[in-house]
Image (spheres, coloured by chain):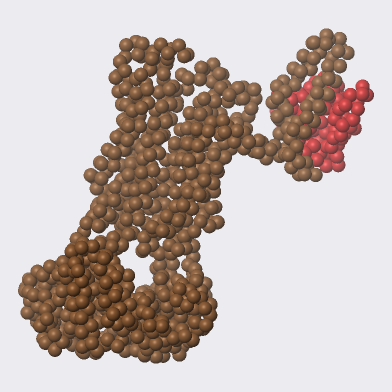
Chain colours: A brown, B red
Amino acid sequence: MGVFRRVSNVFFRAALERKIDAELRSHIEMRIEDNLAAGMSPKEARRAALVRFGNSVAMKERVTAADAALNLASVWSDVRYACRQLRKSPGFAVTAILTLALGIGANTAIFSVVNGVLLNSLPFAHADRLVWIWGRIPSGEHASVSGPDYLDYRAQARSFQKLSAFQRSGISNWSVNGTAKQLQGTMATADFFDTLGTAPMLGRDFAGADEQTGQPQVAILSYHLWQEEFGGRPDVIGQTARIDGDSITIVGVMPSSFDFPTNTDFWYPVPMLSKYMQRRVSHGLRPVGLLKPGTSLMQAQQEVDAIAGRLANLYPTEDKGWSIALQPMQDALVGSTRSVLLILLGAVGMVLLIACVNITNLLLARNAARQREIAIRLAIGAGKMRLLQQFMTESLVLSLLSGLLAILFGYLGVELVRRFGPANLPRLNEVHLNLHVLAYTAFISTFAAIFFGLLPAWLATNTAPQAALRDDGRAGTGRNRHTLGSVLIVSETTLSVCLLIAAALLLQSLWRTLHTSPGFSASGVLTTQMVLPDNYQDSVKRIAFEQQLTYKVRALPGVETVGAIEEIPLGNEGNDDTFFQILGQSLRDPSYKLDEDYRVATPMYFPAMGISLLRGRLFNDADRQLSQPVALIDEPFARKYFPHSDPIGRHLLVFEGTRGYVDREIIGEVSGVRQYGLKILPRPILYFPYTQIDSNGLDLVVRSSGDPRMLAEPIRQIVAGMDAQIGVAAFQTLDEVISESASGDRFDAILIGMFAGLALILAMAGVYGVFSYIVAQQTRDIGVRIALGARPAQILRMVLRRGIHLAILGSALGIVAASFVMRALASQLYQVKSYDPTTYFCSTFVLIVVALGACYLPARRAASVNPVDALRAE
Amino acid sequence: MAKNDLQGSLDLLILKTLAQMGDLHGYGIVLHIQRASDELLSVEEGSLYPALHRMEQSGWVTSKWALTETKRKAKYYKLTAVGRKQLKDAEESFEQLVRGVRAMLRYA
């Protein structure tokens, strides 16, 4: 009953108040009657009755309060009151809501990314039991695992419910009905999809028998390839396609939700009987395991360590020192992005704090104007808690309205990130505004309301009413307000300086990254990737193809040089199992196989890339298939192996798979290139001539005098004219390759830069607001000073000096804070120290100039105060 | 009633009044307490009505509008079973309090 009445009271408050009125009135009238009966005059009788009630408004309020639900009811009326207040001052409302919405929106967007990339579990069944498995080489670096090793682990390890593996096979030529296309293929073991908990939506999964071949026979398509190539027709199952010239049968289609490894167009079974997979030294597979329920990562690691020990005993030449390392799948896939994303989240949080400080300042100014209203309400008996509740409701309404707008901003932000996010940010396609994100938005909106609203509300309700009423509302409260204003300015400048420094460091790092010499000259060079089908295994045919292609492309207008290499620099991932001994030096431990890369290049590759010859000679036409085998080394190689001697003319014994050891003469030394990324120092490379070693990769490098992009179509036609089975992968200029390899750095720098810009604008608005208010408050004082003979220039200087003091104090605190915070950034910086003094100095300088600019207008206003007007206005 | 009235004694007085007098309006409660206490206790209206409404919300009393002897409309309060129980508890604890204070005062 009680509950029902309480709730109904909420909605019928007016009726309730009428009833209370009637009850009190009848009481008063009965008292008057008795007073009259006792012989008082009617006037006296009435007065005596009323006096006993004291403040009737306050009392009615308290009676209503007793009728409970009061909190609910008053919240609703507070909300309506708050909305009315906001409507009454639209300028304030719009400024505050926009400021907050920007801050909250930016946080929403960044949190969506954090949520999608870091927090959400991977889109696989049993994601928590999935482990990523690295091959561990003797030097401790990560690598892949060879086929026979993988099979031994799979057969012996009991910790896993499933132990599958995959290997990205690079670009393959795919053709259906005669038209070639370059697609991304992935080799996968039979239980790969099962391990990841996803079955084909159409057709069948790979079976164990599919692995037991030397040549893949079947393939499973990705959803998008099925849609694009086969129009989503179900009769695709059983059709044949050609991959690099070999025909395979399509047996299944994966659902659209499955995209692993990212951007795979089709999967085919690992051909376990192929020569490559049978070699214990060919490390290419990346295993993925599903732990048995209840098995810990550590138990599994101990077990595989024991297996690694047994393998090393059985196959000492191949496996000595090798092992595998387990890592939770989520860590392996997104772990590297964690620090960057957390830095972004921190930065955007700072922006929100600055926005909140601005709102605090606006509220303080507004409450000062309402001081009298508040004082009167306190004087007639409004409870402090009640008023506090009302002020906080106003703040909450403000920030929840901002939150709604922020969802829109956040949505736009997420779209931007998805469109322009860096290629190396994993799971970008899983970034959405979902319920988690909305809950976060609601949370930070509420938090913001408390953060910016509590102080003004507390101050407003803790003013002695008499003081506020006696005061003319201008002079008296000034001192406190000024201190507060100073605190606000200092905190804003502190946060802004931090963000400015972070942005400046990242931008500098980006600039240095982009201006690092990659070891080649990029402008005017077009590249493309090709893979030759298996029917080019015959060297004569392969060499003839390359020479003819080079000749034809060379003849195109504008082309200066045409070279080719197995794999162009910067994007390299893989490694290989080449091993060599240097004749005349002590034997190298065969377990250190992965130190150096080897690349197969044509003679003109070096001039086309702008890689310079340091000594000796480049390859030339005399280096034929059957002439003396030769090799080029690069500068890092020479520095490592021939630090004090001339390498030219020395001989290497290079292990070349089926051909065994080949004696190669070093004929020259070229400059080093950064093949693994701009920020990674050049690693030693051995170059072999295209004529002397098998390679199915063929990346063309074409230097031209004109716009290299114009060559793309003619080259595509040349290739199609020579062999329709060979597709050509996307053309890229070397400038684009460089730019893409720095896309992650650029993304970080741009985002932090945007946040810093936003922070600077907000801080500027804040400084301007505080000073405008202070000057308005001090109009009378300033008027008096001018009347007493102060010159406008002195007044101007006085205000500016105050501004500069606060900005310097804020910057100093900011620098101290930054020197701690920027350590988190250190790992992201390239050739810039996290405590780079120039950056700190410049950022601080920018901020002080901006702060001065922001208080210049109010200072001008102060200087132009007309003393007569100022004093008369009081 | 004195400002420093003992916590909860107002409730006790109101409940007791209703128990002794049956249905009564607020003004009647004020008069009865004054009369029954030999003018020693005087209830302030400012405390009475919030207390009455609170007790009604707690289900100790119910109320209905009725006419007084002088044909004036007034709100009459009536003790409920819950209220009676509450009164018993309040009386007991008050007795305890009085005994305790008295013992305290007598302590030499």
Q: Would residue A714 be seen by someone viewing this image from the given angle?
A: yes
Q: In front here: A483 or A75?
A: A75
Picture quadrant where residue A812 is located: top left
Q: In front here: A56 or A177?
A: A177
The percent position of residue A276, horizontal first and vertical second, equals 31, 86
User: What is the number of callouts on the image?
Assistant: 0
Q: Is residue A454 left or right of residue A1?
A: left
Q: Is residue A777 above or below residue A221?
A: above
Q: Would residue A809 be seen by someone viewing this image from the given angle?
A: no
Q: Is residue A460 above or below residue A449?
A: above
Q: In front here: A714 or A496?
A: A714
Image quarter hosting the N terminus of chain A: top right
Tell me the residue at 17%/84% (across/down): A692
Tell me the residue at 50%/42% (across/down): A448
Q: Is residue A174 above or below residue A608?
A: below
Tell me the residue at 11%/79% (across/down): A620
Q: Is residue A392 above or below residue A307?
A: above
Residue positioned most to the front: A557
Tell me the residue at 16%/66% (across/down): A610
The percent position of residue A267, horizontal first and vertical second, equals 42, 79
Picture quadrant where residue A777 is located: top left
